[in-house]
Image (tube, helix red, strand yellow):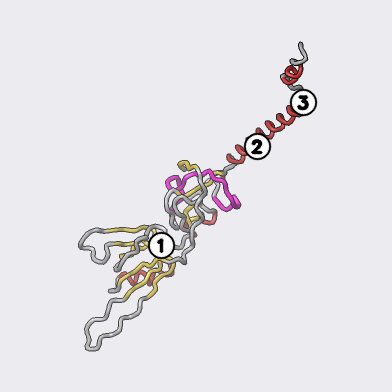
């Protein structure tokens, strides 16, 4: 071998285990593998909890038709929500409104005896809010009919609040031309103590009005991105 070929041969020599560059490369590969493994495990660290398949109102049964399974990464305490591992208590119902797609809180699950509400169908006589639907919280007012007859016209009586923060269970529409009023009725969940006033107003000559309110108890925050399964 000539003197000119000697530096070239040294440059082409394979690195040995004593070469520091080989050690650095091994450490970099090991770090990359460890980081990838941690990322995969962290992404898979989800919890299976129940979510509402549709809007739930107080008294709705919590069964397979009402719930789905959601695999989510919970940012807060896991004990706040109803885990699939614990199952749904027998004959459980919703104690408050839970919106479709929202995680079901433990505090919103209980026995039917705990729901002191009665469904009452109310025909609405005046304009109906556009966003009125199941789960909407409303105040129910009675607007008295204007006085008739007499030489001196009387001032109309002021509206009367019949019930506050009532939950709409269902909206019923009747397109018949003979129904009168708006043709829209709502099924409201009325506390037992408010029933006398509400039922008495149904036979009056006044108009019943449902006014949406922001005073009702909101549902839980929407669930983060999750993969749903049939419950």
Task: Look at 30% across and 65% down and name the residue there.
Answer: 123
Can you say which quadrant of the picture contains the N terminus? top right
* Front of the two marks 3 and 2: 3
Label 2: state its secondary structure: helix
Vertical arrangement, residue 167 with respect to residue 151, above or below: above
Badge 1 or badge 2: first in the primary sequence: 2
Q: Nearer the viewer, residue 107 or 91?
A: 107
Cα distance between the residues tagged 1 and 2? 54 Å
In the rendered image, the residue lying farthest to the left is: 177
In the rendered image, the residue lying farthest to the bottom is: 151
Task: Provide the residue designation for mark 2.
Answer: 35
Task: Look at 79% across and 25% down and name the residue there.
Answer: 18
**Where does the magenta region start and end?**
60-81
Q: Is residue 5 magenta?
A: no
Cα distance between the residues tagged 1 and 3? 79 Å
* Front of the two marks 1 and 2: 2
Q: Is residue 68 magenta?
A: yes
Task: Provide the residue designation for mark 1.
Answer: 189
Task: Provide the residue designation for mark 3.
Answer: 19
In the rendered image, the residue lying farthest to the top is: 1
């Amino acid at each position: 071998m000539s003197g000119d070929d000697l530096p070239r041969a040294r440059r082409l020599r394979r690195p040995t285990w004593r070469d520091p560059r080989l050690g650095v490369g091994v450490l970099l590969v090991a770090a990359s593998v460890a980081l990838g493994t941690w990322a995969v495990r962290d992404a898979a660290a989800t919890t299976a909890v129940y979510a509402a398949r549709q809007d739930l109102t107080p008294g709705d049964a919590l069964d397979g038709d009402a719930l789905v399974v959601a695999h989510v990464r919970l940012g807060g305490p896991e004990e706040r929500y109803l885990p699939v591992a614990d199952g749904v208590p027998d004959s459980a119902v919703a104690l408050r409104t839970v919106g479709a797609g929202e995680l079901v809180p433990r505090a919103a699950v209980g026995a039917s005896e705990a729901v002191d509400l009665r469904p009452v169908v109310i025909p609405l006589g005046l304009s109906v809010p556009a966003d009125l639907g199941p789960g909407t919280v409303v105040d129910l007012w009675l607007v008295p009919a204007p006085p008739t007859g007499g030489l001196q016209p009387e001032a109309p009586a002021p509206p009367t609040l019949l019930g506050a923060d009532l939950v709409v269970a269902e909206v019923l529409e009747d397109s018949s031309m003979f129904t009168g009023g708006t043709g829209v009725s709502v099924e409201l969940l009325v506390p037992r103590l408010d029933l006398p006033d509400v039922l008495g107003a149904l036979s009056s000559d006044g108009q019943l009005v449902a006014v949406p309110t922001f005073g009702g108890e909101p549902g839980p925050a929407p669930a983060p991105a999750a993969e749903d399964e049939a419950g």
